[in-house]
Image: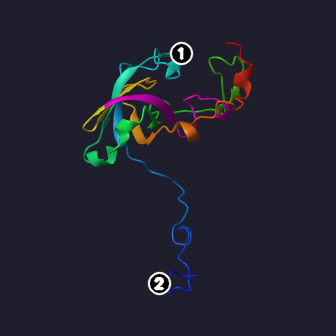
């Protein structure tokens, strides 16, 4: 059914009929992490460690790609999600040994950086914004990590404190 301004023909609900599912996806960084961590050894594995927040730095956005107005209203959020490309992880395997798990686990049951597409997800504290620079706290990322996207952390839909955490629940602190 083709789209028409005719009231008898409803507009399409999505674009499936005109857009193919891609075989590959190419992404461009919208910015880069500027972090005190310069190598994998010594970089925190999670942004919050035993209640203490570590890793202060900033996200430097590519002004040629992202206009400053894209950051409008972000200052009102305590936290933001950083979606990143973990560029120093060129290989992956189906099983990994997580630091707290002891035995080898399926990679998709872990937060290992060694996934097929090496996409990172970090919830960091937004300290302040200065133009196209976002000062953040709680970084678990290496200096120069490409940032693919930024989204606000919204507690009512991003936090599920009563959710089961699989094998992690069984690991003693």
Image coordinates of residue 137 in percent, x first then y, are: 40, 23
Q: Is residue 60 left or right of residue 154?
A: left
Q: Residue at x 34, y 34 (%)?
A: 32
Start-end of magenta stretch: 108-128
Q: Which x, y percent locates residue 14? A: 54, 67
Tag on residue 51? 1
Residue labelled with disc 2: 5
Position of the N terminus by quadrant: bottom right
- In the picture, measured across the screen, residue 120 lies left or right of residue 75, that is right
Q: Which quadrant: the C terminus?
A: top right
Q: Please tell me how crowded label 1 is: few (under 14), some (14-19), or many (20+) other residues with Cα within 10 Å.
A: few
Q: Is residue 25 visible?
A: yes
Check residue 66 for magenta coloring.
Answer: no
User: Where residue 122 sits in the image (x, y, percent)?
Assistant: 49, 31
Seen at 37% across and 27% down, the residue is: 136
Q: Earlier in the sequence, mark 1 or mark 2?
A: 2
| Front residue (pair 73, 83) | 73
Q: Residue at image x 69%, y 32%?
A: 163
Give the image location of residue 138, x and y in percent: 44, 23
């Amino acid at each position: 059914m083709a789209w028409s301004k005719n009231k008898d023909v409803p507009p399409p609900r999505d674009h499936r009929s005109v857009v193919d599912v891609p075989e590959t996806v190419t992404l461009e960084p919208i910015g880069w992490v500027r972090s005190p961590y310069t190598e994998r050894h010594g970089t925190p594995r999670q942004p919050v460690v035993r209640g203490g927040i570590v890793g202060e730095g900033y996200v430097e956005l590519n002004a040629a790609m992202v206009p400053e107005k894209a950051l409008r209203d972000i200052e009102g959020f305590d936290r933001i999600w950083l979606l990143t490309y973990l560029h120093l992880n060129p290989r992956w395997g189906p099983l990994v040994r997580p630091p707290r798990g002891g035995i080898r686990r399926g990679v998709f049951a872990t937060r290992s950086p060694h996934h097929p597409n090496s996409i990172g997800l970090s919830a960091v504290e937004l300290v302040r914004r200065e133009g196209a620079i976002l000062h953040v706290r709680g970084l678990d990322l290496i200096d120069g990590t490409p940032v693919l996207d930024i989204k606000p952390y919204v507690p009512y839909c991003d936090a599920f404190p009563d959710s089961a955490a699989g094998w992690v629940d069984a690991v003693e602190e």
